[in-house]
Image: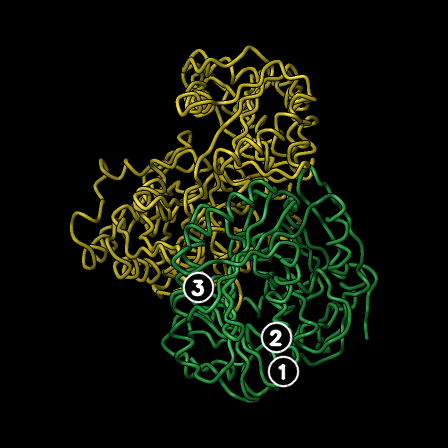
Amino acid sequence: MEMPPPDMMVIARKPRIVARLLEVLPDDAVIHEEAETRAYECDALTAYRCPPLCAVLPSSTQEVSAVLRICHEEGVPVVPRGSGTSLAGGALPTADCVILGVARLNDVLETSYSDRYIRVQTGRTNLSVTGAVEEEDFFYAPDPSSQLACAIAGNIAMNSGGAHCLKYGVTTNNLLGVKMVLMDGTIIEIGGAHLDAPGYDLLGLICGSEGQLGVVTEATLRILRKPEGARPVLMAFNDSEVAGACVADIIKAGVLPVAIEFMDRLCIETSENFAQAGYPDCEALLIVEVEGSDAEIDEQLGVILQIARRHDPIELRESTSPEESAKIWLGRKSAFGAIGQISDYMCLDGTIPVSSLPMVLRRIGELSEHYGLRVGNVFHAGDGNMHPLILFDANKEGDLELCEAMGADILRLCVEAGGCLTGEHGVGIEKRDLMFDQFDPEDLELQMKVKDVFDPKWLLNPAKVFPLTASESRRTG
Amino acid sequence: MLAPQSEAELADIVKSSSQPFAVQGGGTRGIETSGALLSTSGLQGITLYEPGALTLVARSGTPVSEVEAILAKENQRLAFEPMDHRSLMGTTGVPTIGGVVAGNISGPRRIMAGACRDSLIGVRFVDGTGTVIKNGGRVMKNVTGYDLVKLMAGSFGTLGILSEVSFKVLPGVADVKTLVFGGLSVAQAIEAMSLGLGSPFEVSGAAHDPARQETSLRLEGFEASVAYRAKALSELLVQFGQAQILDHESAAYWDNVANVTDFATQTGDVWRISVKPSDAPRVSAALPGIALRYDWGGGLIWALCAPGQDLRPPLDGIAGHATRVRGAPGIAMFQPEPASIAALAQGLRARFDPRAILNSGLMGASHANDIHA
């Protein structure tokens, strides 16, 4: 994937830019030695790397504002960075950019259980938000699988989801307010502990804008009381399409599980070899989890199991203890790591209508044969968010390109099926040049006009989201 | 009145005209606009409904009642429980699904299931230049490009005219019960509702009516589950007295809460105030002698006051916003925004509707004198 050539004029002015940044930040917050900027050369899309001009680690909103004002005046592109866990290259630098990391902004500022919100600085990790409220039996709902490491700033930038979205929604549904710094240094506040906006829903617009509209430094997040209990059931089938049909029937029946997870044979076998979760030998399995009191769980699982039995499962395994629950989840949670043990892989993130699941699985199988690359399917079936894992060999000449070409075909298939390119990882650079497969030029033009309003000079994370050809005149203008 | 029968016809009308339009769905929500009346009522029909995927797509002029009826057949529903403004506003006509989206209209269940914008997963609209734009789609997880879906929700036709809207829908429920506590002060009511909403019992409505001295918490779900939670919630809230439990009367009870039926028959201006629930007693103290009704656990407060009375000055200093829903123009309908936010709103407005022909002056103002910040 191509990145625009760096602005040599900016690179030539590095000493001056660093000196100005050092005027507003402590010495240890400006990283500019070549040996040290390398730490910021990539995010979790590790196939692409480029050390930035420098990296800054401000400790307050005021410092963020000062940094942005300088970069704005100097015409330096800024790439905001949470914890650098983006799989889409959302935090990939260019050689002429300043990486603005929010890692030092990690305080809890305010917690209210009676009004059910928490206000945090956005460098705080996702899991540590729940960690801050779980003593009172509360939690923060979005749970991306990188939640141990990923920052709230990145969650907001990519509108992150997780396994429990079917019931609790994604980041945008759990975000009440932000403090944000615009590229020119202006500090704005949107929303707060109250609900809904008086004017345009700028909060909804900012969530998922991939760090292109501003740098969010504080967030007010909705927290929820933990359910009394949760229990998963594992269902094994000898046919992926039957498993897909079972998902649709469960949803139609009026029960709303918190999670419906799907794994295919490759993922089942690989994670079984790795984690020994005791999964059955089958073509497809579902993990369905429901919440409530014991009696409520019994009632819901009664309905769900009755439906599952109509689809000829080869096994239905209902957890009877916390240990068994953990074991049912173990294989699913180990799936990515297990695949990583046997091969390099690329993790896709397309979403499809649940009804298209059988067709899409079949076509992915055909593409796998066509390209000669194996694919594992593990995904959030309840909401149609697929994570096909394409296995390739990074040391083999041309294999990465082959893998990317196949990934693009799978994502086009998702769009063709009525879905979209990305459900929860974001566009970044990874899906940037596929955007014309989902949108007409007019659709993208209006989105770019939104960026014009927030960042007229196109300095914030400029080479992401929009195809380079579409954004070129704005980035270089 | 212009009432195009297709999206293409709508786009042609906008493209070829430079006259300002008053954009309208069913015209039931009392939105104050001027210009040639342009109605979406000709854009009708449910274009996709997949119960197994919890997805419904409808053209914007489709009556809300038609959407609700087709969902009910499959025991599904719009999670956000849109309010019907007709009795409150004294309007007639047919509320449309596009109107619900344009106003981001939500009801009591908003406190648990989110607002209209949270259920909205896709839009098609015609912008102020007559260009057809799509954003989002028909899947519930989608971060492909900027989320203009949320931006369009609650933009009251000022950024574009909706032609089609897509929703994530939810299963309906087998049973509903409402716990009603009597004789609580505002402060006690807020405390009781906050305890309930902070419990694991999935309270899907929490309202307080000081006139009837009733504080109500709603539970929905499968029969045995609702019975269990009603008992557990009663025990949790025992310090607030013995709850009376409503069964089949619940539906009508919450319709009245959603539609603020109490204020429909009384004269005066009606305001809608959004604050964090714990600030509700401050709102009450700041508005002495004004009739109030509390929803969303105290976070949404409806106020009935004398015609022409501006409720914003007494509420100054309490975080949140106040909208004048009913009453003669003269006081800005929407809460004025700080200058930095207003500048962004105006910038968006100028890009989406460069000729300022869509519901001109309503919000996202090209009218600097609306801004009192």
Say whether marks 3 and 1 touch (CB < 8 Å). Answer: no
In this view, the mark in front (3 or 2): 2
Say whether marks 1 and 2 touch (CB < 8 Å). Answer: yes
Q: Colour of chain B?
A: green
Could you say which disc has been placed on residue A200 in the image?
A: none
Whether residue A215 is visible to the viewer of this picture, yes or no, is: no
Label 3 Cα crowd, 10 Å radius (few <14 / some 14-19 / many 20+): many
The x, y position of residue A378, in whole percent, is 53, 25
Residue at the (55%, 51%) spot, across then down: B219
Which chain is mark 2 on? B
The residue tagged with tag 1: helix, strand or loop? loop
Q: Pointer 3: what residue? A: A194
In this view, the mark in front (3 or 1): 1
* Distance from Cα at disc 3 to Cα at disc 2: 24 Å
Label 2 Cα crowd, 10 Å radius (few <14 / some 14-19 / many 20+): some
Residue at the (67%, 70%) spot, across then down: B85
Could you say which disc has been placed on residue B266 in the image?
A: 1
The x, y position of residue B300, in whole percent, is 50, 67
Residue B373 in the figure: left or right of residue B39: left
Q: Nearer the viewer, residue B315 or B253?
A: B253
Could you say which disc has been placed on residue B262 in the image?
A: 2
Which chain is mark 1 on? B
The x, y position of residue A75, in whole percent, is 36, 58
The x, y position of residue A55, in whole percent, is 27, 46
